[in-house]
Amino acid sequence: MIIVNNVIDIEKLNLWYGDNQALIDVSMPVERNKVTALIGPSGCGKSTLLRSINRMNDLIDNCKIEGNMMFNGEDIYDSKTDVIKVRKKIGMIFQKPNPFPMSIRDNITYGPKIHGVTDRNELEKIVEDSLKGAALWEEVKDRLDKSAMTLSGGQQQRLCIARTLSVSPEVILMDEPTSALDPIATSKIEDLMIELVKKYTVVIVTHNMQQAARISDRTGFMYLGELVEFDDTEKIFEKPSMELTDRYISGRFG
C-alpha cells in the first residue's frame, strides 16, 4: 500500500458565489500532521478556501465549485461522497467560540451519540480523552455537568476543539480561532495546536502573521482569490519568492 503524505490535495480549485469568483485556480497540498497557515488581507479567499475543504460552502446558495479536492486520495466533491462522513473526518473550529447551550459533558457526547455511540462507559472515556486532548480536562473535570456557557472565552474555544476531537477527525480546520481571545488564551490555543499535530492535521486561517510564523510548518499567501505563494513557513517569512508576498509580509502592502 502506498502511503500518501498529503492528507489533502487541492488542484485548480475555482469557486463562485453567483457571478463573483472567490477562488481562482488554487492548487496546494496539505501535509499530514503539519500545521498549514493561510494568510492574506480580508476578502482574499482564505476562509472560503478553508470552508471548501469540508464542503461548508454547500450551505451557501448559488455557490459553484470546479476543480479537484482530494482527501486521502478520494474526491471530496464526488457526487457519491458522504458529506456527513467528510465533516466527521474534517472538523471545523470557528472564529467565535460556539459551545452548545448545554453541559460541558453533553457538548462532548453530542457528536458521538449522533454517530451511534450509546455505551455510557465509552462515552465517559471519550469525554475525558477529548478534554485532555484539548488541554481542558484539569480545569473542568469537577464540573462536567455545569453549563458550557459558564466557561471563559478561551475555555469555550478549547471545549469546541474537544467537541471536534470527540468524533475522531483526521483534519482540524481553524478559521481565526484566537481572534476573539486575549493574549493568554491565544497562547494556550497556539500551544495546543502544536500538540495536536502529533495526532491530527491542522489548517488555520489567521490575520496574525506572527501567529502563522510561530506555529505553522507551511504557509500560503492569498490575494484576490489567488494563492500567490505557498512554501515552508520559514521561507515565506524570510525569503519569499514573490514580490507581492514580500510587500505583504514586510508591511509595505497597499
Image (cartoon, rainbow, N blue to C red):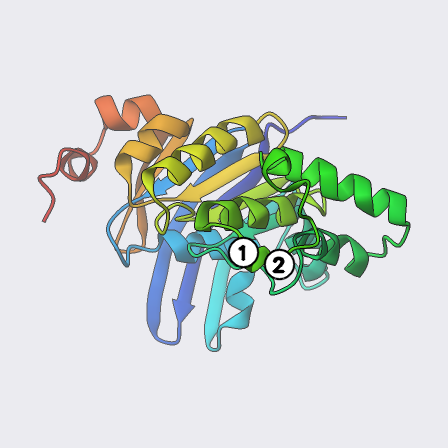
Q: Between residues 180 and 231, which one lies in front from this camera angle?
A: 180
Local crowd size for mark 1, using a 10 Å CA cut-off: few (<14), some (14–19), many (≥20)? few
Q: Position of residue 205 (x, y in %)?
A: 39, 46
Q: In the image, is residue 84 above or below residue 29?
A: below
Secondary structure at badge 2 equals loop
Q: Position of residue 36 (x, y in %)?
A: 44, 35
Q: In the image, is residue 236 above or below residue 76?
A: above
Q: In the image, is residue 165 above or below residue 145?
A: above
- Answer whether labels 2 and 1 touch (C-beta < 8 Å): yes
Q: Between residues 143 and 210, which one lies in front from this camera angle?
A: 143
Residue 83 image-quadrant placement: bottom right
Q: Position of residue 42 (x, y in %)?
A: 26, 55
Position of residue 224 in the picture relative to residue 72 (left or right): left
How far apart are the alpha carbons under marks 2 and 1? 6 Å
Label 1: which residue? Answer: 150
Position of residue 92 in the picture relative to residue 146 (left or right): left
